[in-house]
Image (cartoon, grey):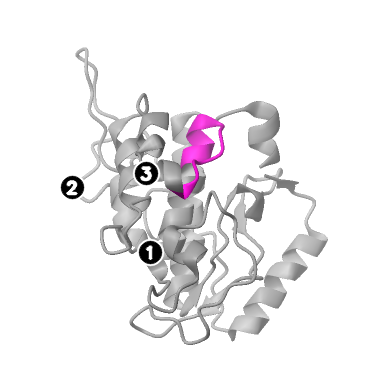
Amino acid sequence: YDMIKFNGAFDVEPAVKCINKVLDAVEYIHNNNTLHLDIKPSNIMVRRSDGRVTLIDFGLSKEIDDQGRLLTSTSVIGVSPRFAPLEQMQRSAEVQMSTATDIYATGATLLMLVTGNLPPMISDVLENKHIEMVSSQPENIKNAIAKSMEVAPLKRIKTVAEFRALLNAKKEVTGGGTDNGGSNGNGGNGNGGNGNGGGKNNNPQAEKPKVKMWMWIAAMVAVIAISGGAYW
């Protein structure tokens, strides 16, 4: 958050690279039956020394089953309104939170990175204000934000793989230029052909020991305590 506050919006390539690293972490926790439920720039830490990106603050996290349904109560103490989707804001037992809930927040985070502005409230998302905010962005950015910030959970993309495919999609080139790395139909590297942050298995940033949820969260707290990194 501080990086955006003091330096303004990210250029497209650094924004894509950062979100790809966030997606690595989101994919890991989803694969370990957990929803984060508070993804936003202020919960993303970037280490100065090497640019390592770490997703922090699991205070609102919930466990899910293998079908992505909550195993515990749907009640959430505290939400981040501009990053939480409608189902999380309503806190209704009739509308289950799922992996799509974290996908919405990740899309809202991408929007803030590339615009330097807070995402719109849900009432404005219903009027497509989020689409207007990124109208000048490349198609891959616009598509990733549009599909990840669908208000209706059933219309929204639900997995990291879907988000990554949209985000890293081959960009259209005009004016006789060349394409940026020849990415394939599923998104390729999407980063100038250098493979930074685009591949699913390319140096994932989430820690990957198979530990219980509470131990993993404790480890994240320890990282924060000893890190000299910069915070968004």
Q: Which type of secondary structure does the marked residue at label 3 adopt?
A: helix
Q: Is residue 37 above or below residue 135?
A: below
Disc 1, disc 3: CB below 8 Å?
Answer: no
Magenta stretch: includes residue 113: yes
State the residue lying farthest toward the top: 175
Name the residue: 24% across, 28% down.
Answer: 179
Image depth: mark 2 or mark 3 in front: 3
Disc 2 residue type? Answer: Gly
- Residue at which label 1 appears: 100
Give me the C-alpha separation between circle 2 and circle 3: 19 Å
Q: Nearer the viewer, residue 168 or 49?
A: 168
**Residue 76: where, in percent of width, then height?**
58, 72
Q: Is residue 43 above or below residue 192?
A: below
Name the residue: 70% across, 39% down.
Answer: 2
Label 2 crowd (10 A; few <14 / some 14-19 / many >=20): few
**Residue 144: where, in percent of width, then height?**
34, 45
Image depth: mark 2 or mark 1 in front: 1
* N-terminal-most mark, 2 or 3: 3
